[in-house]
Amino acid sequence: MDILDDYVNWKLENHDLLHNLVQNKSKTISRFTSVIVVVDYLYEASLKRKLTEDETLFFTMGFDYIHDNFYTIKTLLEYKFNNNYQELEHCAKSINLLLYVNEFQGELLGLNLDTKVLDSFEEKINTYIDQKDNVPDSFFPMLDDIINPIFEQNQIEFHPIESIFYEIAVEYGIYKPNDFDIYNAVFNLQKEKTKQK
């Protein structure tokens, strides 16, 4: 079985979750919609032709990313929200921030850097999720304050996967360059709200 078959099987296994989140334009998945769109596009292309090496890499990277994020969302839905989609969606802001933190933790672990500060921040977010509540807007710039010094001190140039996939989507003509930038929409919105206060 190859990665394309894995993707089809994953979609079948997670049909209800995917259907509910995509059909209801869930804010829980808004930050990585570009990844979903590109992976689906490449899967459809693979039915007509052989994918290039780059396309295979994009598909694999994107599917891994979607799989990990949906696993987190599915776990939260089941264990924190008793399979109640409305409650899950109500906490979309907290969940999106948690997914950002998880991505940064993965990046730092991959570089063998300490994640203690991020782990502590993750615990604070989880406290809000446990209470079925959203984090305050101030948590978004707080994440910047944690991450930026780490990246600057270690001379790391970080490119979020959803940002890369947004560019890929534009390249394939799935999005037009002046379309609404799905990447980072929730995160930037919260940062702007905080600045205006």
Image: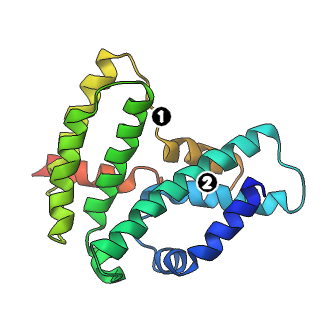
Q: Nearer the viewer, residue 78 or 166?
A: 78
Whole-percent x, y for residue 85 in the image = 36, 81
Q: In this orientation, which residue lies closer to the viewer: 21 or 72?
A: 72
Q: Mark 2 Cα within 10 Å, few/some/many (few <14, many 20+)?
A: many
Residue kind at label 2, given as amino acid type: Phe
Q: Mark 2 sits on what residue? A: 63
Of all residues, the one furthest to the right in this rendering is 49
Q: Earlier in the sequence, mark 1 or mark 2?
A: 2
In percent of width and height, residue 108 lies at: 37, 30
Where disc 2 sits, the SS reads helix
Query: Is 157 situated left or right of 193 in this image?
Result: right
The residue drawn where x is 57% and y is 51% is 64
Residue 3, located in which quarter of the rendered image? bottom right
Above or below, comparing residue 197 to residue 17 in the picture: above
Q: Which residue is found at the position 33% from the left and 57% from the top? A: 96
Which mark, residue 78? none
> Residue 193: x percent and y percent?
19, 54
Q: Is residue 137 left or right of residue 5?
A: left
Is residue 179 visible in the rendered image? The answer is no
In the rendering, which numbered label is found on residue 159?
1
Q: Quadrant of residue 84?
A: bottom left
Report if residue 64 is visible in the image: yes
Eyeballing the image, is 172 above or below 11?
above
From the viewer's perspective, is the residue at label 1 or at label 2 nearer? 2
Please provide percent x and percent y for residue 114. Answer: 28, 27
Tell me if mark 1 has few (under 14), some (14-19) or many (20+) residues whose alpha carbon lies within 10 angstroms of its own.
few
Tell me: residue 196, above or below residue 48.
above
